[in-house]
Every structure is written in structure tokens, then in C-alpha cells.
Amino acid sequence: MLLDGPRLAPLSGAAPDALVILVHGYGSNGEDLISLAAMMQPALPGAAFVAPDAPSQIPQMAAAHQWWPIETFSMAERAAGADAATPVLDAFITHELEQAGLGDDRLVLIGFSQGTMMALHAGLRRPQPAAGIVGISGMLVAPERLATDIRSRPPVLLIHGTEDEVVPFRSMELAEAALAAAGVPVETHVSPGTGHGVAPDGLAAAAAFTKRVLS
């Protein structure tokens, strides 16, 4: 199964010199995240953007997709879900890079919430490092396995709102510690007063980081 979703071609009008893949959260879809890409485009005129829809729909909700079903909120459920969905996202990443004629060093993954879990889980297990990974309002799945599972160490930016009511703010600190322990270059951006969402300061931080790692 190959994923698909809304796309934005490079503003430059030329062939893409970079690929930014936006990975949406639980109950959302690619259309929801491609709006972020439109706001980042001016800083990255040579980049192509794509926001794939997650592989399964939430029952009775036509536009609501999920990378895995959330029923128990347990660590075991998260690990099993991310493990199951990673090959699908990984195949999509490889296909998109091949279509664009680009290597992993020209790839940035930007995830939100469950999409952050996926971006980190898949990105750190690819044999070649991406240019960077941005994780917004998410967490690191199965941190205890990272030391044995990790295959590449791209720079990572974690962004989190202090008032996140869905994924606790402390998740960022826990992920930062686990990533640093595994030798991943990691930085963080705190959005004061922000709940489970993307604030303008967080979006600006994501754009600046993406531009820097691709330059």
C-alpha cells in the first residue's frame, strides 16, 4: 500500500532541491497539515512538500485518519502501533525521494502529535540520515529500544506547548533525554501557554530549523 496526500510544488518553479514530508496526527489528515507547508514555503522556495494521509481511517469518520488505533493509551500499544505503521511510511519516504531524484540528506520530516511519534520512529530507523526531523506536540515511542534500533542520527528539533492537554509537556524532556543518550543531536523549542497545537512561534522555529539543516 502506497500512501498519498496533498502536495505543494516548489515555489521556485524548478525541480525540487529538497523534500519536506509532513506527518499528521491522530484523527487528522494530510489536508490539515499542508496549510503549515504553505506558511513555510517562502523560507524554502526550492522544497517540495507532501502530507500523506495515514493508512487507516477512523470508523464512521470519513476524513479522520490514524497511524494506529488509540484504545488504551498504553506504552505497549504505542510501540506496537508505530512498529506496524513504520514500514508503510518508510516505503512512502523512499518512493517520494526516488520520484524527486533526491537523497535522504535532502529530506526533512515534520510530525505533529501521533505524526511526531511516526516521524521519529521511522526516521531514526532509516539507514541514511535525513537532513532533519521536527517533532511538534509529540513523544518518543519505545525510548528503551532506541539504543538497539537506531540506524541514523539526523538532527532533531522538538517543539511543545507548555499547556498541552493531550500529550504532556514533560514528554518533550523525556524524548530529549533519550535522543541525547542515543547520540542524536537534539534541540528544543518551548511554546509558552500553547495547548495541543502549533503556535506561530513554533512554526517559525520549525521553518528556521528546516532551512538551516537544508542549507
Image (cartoon, rainbow, N blue to C red):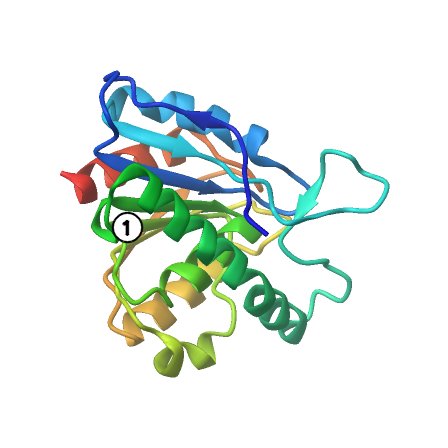
- Residue at point 29%, 67% (across, down): 127
Please name whichever residue, 173 or 30, is drawn nearer the observer in this view of the structure.
30
Query: Residue 207 at what x, y percent from top left?
Result: 30, 33
Outermost residue, left side? 215
- So how many labels did they put on this image? 1
Name the quadrant of the C terminus: top left
Residue that numbered label 1 is attached to: 132
Query: Residue 39 at what x, y percent from top left?
Result: 39, 22
Please name whichever residue, 113 or 30, is drawn nearer the observer in this view of the structure.
30
Q: Is residue 64 left or right of residue 144?
A: right
Q: Is residue 172 above or below residue 111?
A: below
Q: In what element is the residue under mark 1?
A: strand
Q: Is residue 196 left or right of residue 146?
A: right
- Residue at point 25%, 37% (across, down): 18
Query: Residue 87 at what x, y percent from top left?
Result: 51, 63
Residue type, label 1: Gly
Query: Residue 61 at what x, y percent from top left?
Result: 80, 38
Q: Is residue 79 left or right of residue 207?
A: right
Regarding residue 161, the answer to whether it shows in the image is: no
Regarding residue 109, the answer to whether it shows in the image is: yes
Q: Is residue 167 above or below residue 48?
A: below
Q: Is residue 131 left or right of residue 123?
A: left
